[in-house]
Image (tube, rainbow, N blue to C red):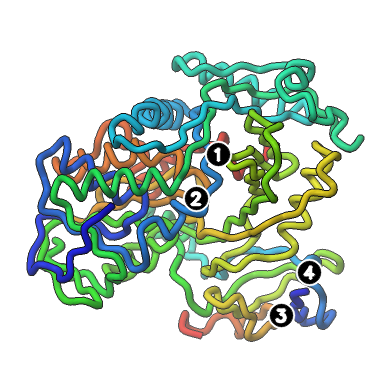
Amino acid sequence: MKLISCPVNGLRPLQEFSYGGEFREMPEPSSASDAEWADYVFNHDGAPGIKREWWYHIASGVWFIAERDTLKDEIMRTYLYSHDSCRTSRDI
Amino acid sequence: MFRTPDALKRQYDVVIIGAGGHGLAAAYYLARDHGIRDIAVLEKSYIGSGGTGRNTAIIRSNYLTPEGVRFYDESVRLFQDLAADFDLNIFYSRRGHFTLAHTDGTLRTMRWRAEVNKHLGVDSELVNAAFVKSKCPLIDLSCGHGMPILGALYHPPGAIARHDAVAWGYGRGADQRGVEIHQFTEVTGIDVKSDHVVGVQTNRGYIETRRVLSAVAGYTPRIMNMVNVRTPLVVQPLQACVSEPLKPWLDTIIVSASLHLYVSQSSRGELVMGASLDPYEVHSTRSTLDFVEGLCGHLLDLFPFLSDVKIMRQWAGLADMTPDFSPIMGLTPIGGLFIDSGWGTWGFKATPVCGKTMAYTVANNEPHELIGPFRLSRFNEFDLVGEKGAASVGH
């Protein structure tokens, strides 16, 4: 069984979690151009790599960030969202 | 069946990346219909090793959007002549396709789909549960007393075919017309000068070319990263499995989006089954026990008598999903670079029409009229084609 470490509840089975998509920084909606907004809404870095993602622990309602290798499907690190932990550069 | 050229030439008129059904079909129609024969098809593994050989081989055109219905219906029409075109048996078998409805909401969507289909000349109808039972007597309409079957969208032209043979037929036809198919040849870079393709780097040497078609489905983001073109594609595995061979008992194709299940019986007697996408991004073709457990549970709701039947093998393919469940086809911001992607869970049935329309697009440097709505730039223009008739969409 695949386990994920929830930052609040510890190791729990994958079935208790839901995937929330790639973590992306939202451009300022009032000043972004149409092209920047479309890029934010639709486009992804679709190639494999280590990515920062939103995950949700369904049973306890905890949203958190996971850093995951999408080629091997291995989670490297999980932590709660904070302004500082997620404002760093795109390269993890 | 094919020549195996021992070396790449220095230069080709067109380079096609990916020797799956789509890439080989494009090569075939370029050579047959457009007189362009100086083509190299590059494949990093063997012919048909990607999505072409990993799907559940269902062919249908009862989609929801007029753009989708027109496009897939042309594909169904082309499929019916392929065996004669190739002089090769592709085991094309018309079965009739049922998409089951277990709720009033689904029935409403089925009615909508049936009306769009009929308006565009596609044989498609909403039928009641008794009709489903008459065509598929072994089905349990109570569906395990959980979600009884209320009716279905019935699409008589729904068919299955031998997916490998489709790739082999296109490959052989292209090969006979002078196209070179280079297996185990991986593209490692694409050279662009002044916003136009000038060459392709491979693990077997450099090729000069002014036209490149990327037909690599789940590997598209890796190719597009080479030229810094961003796409909305998200790659998720789509798993499938087959049972041990059984005597023929199921001659229709049964699909239930609510149960995440589609099943047909192959000419070898195996039940060929698939479910929904794995729920998050992964670039590996690993299989999981969760998938087989979930799928078999739902299969037994419909066909309880199968409880003693063994699953023989399972596998996965990479599905390149788009936000609107429609493909991405046509030109890119790079001159001479063409894209055929976004094939998610609906790529096999589109193989012939993709080959034909992409061949036109590459030959004329303008999109074929059938694929205009599927252009990459539709996302920048907020002009999406919401295809809720796709296999992975629940209603």
Q: Name the residue nearer the viewer: B306 or B128.
A: B306
**Is there a contact, CB below 8 Å, between mark 4 and mark 2?**
no
The residue at the point 28 percent across, 49 percent down is B171
Point out the tag, 4 or 3, that comes first from the N-terminus. 4
Instruction: Judge depth for marks 3 and 1 and give the one in front.
Output: 1
- Amino acid under disc 1: Ala
Give coordinates of residue B91: x percent, y percent. 46, 36
- Amino acid under disc 3: Leu
Give coordinates of residue B203: x percent, y percent. 25, 77
Q: Name the residue nearer the viewer: B269 or B120.
A: B269
The outermost residue toward the front is B247
The residue at the point 51 percent across, 60 percent down is B318
Q: Which residue is mark 1?
A: B390
**Is there a contact, CB below 8 Å, between mark 1 and mark 2?**
yes
Is B13 positioned to the left or the right of A1 in the image? left
From this viewpoint, is residue B294 visible? yes
Is B119 positioned to the left or the right of B42 in the image? right
Q: Chain of mark 2?
A: B
Helix, strand or loop for disc 1: loop
Helix, strand or loop for disc 2: loop
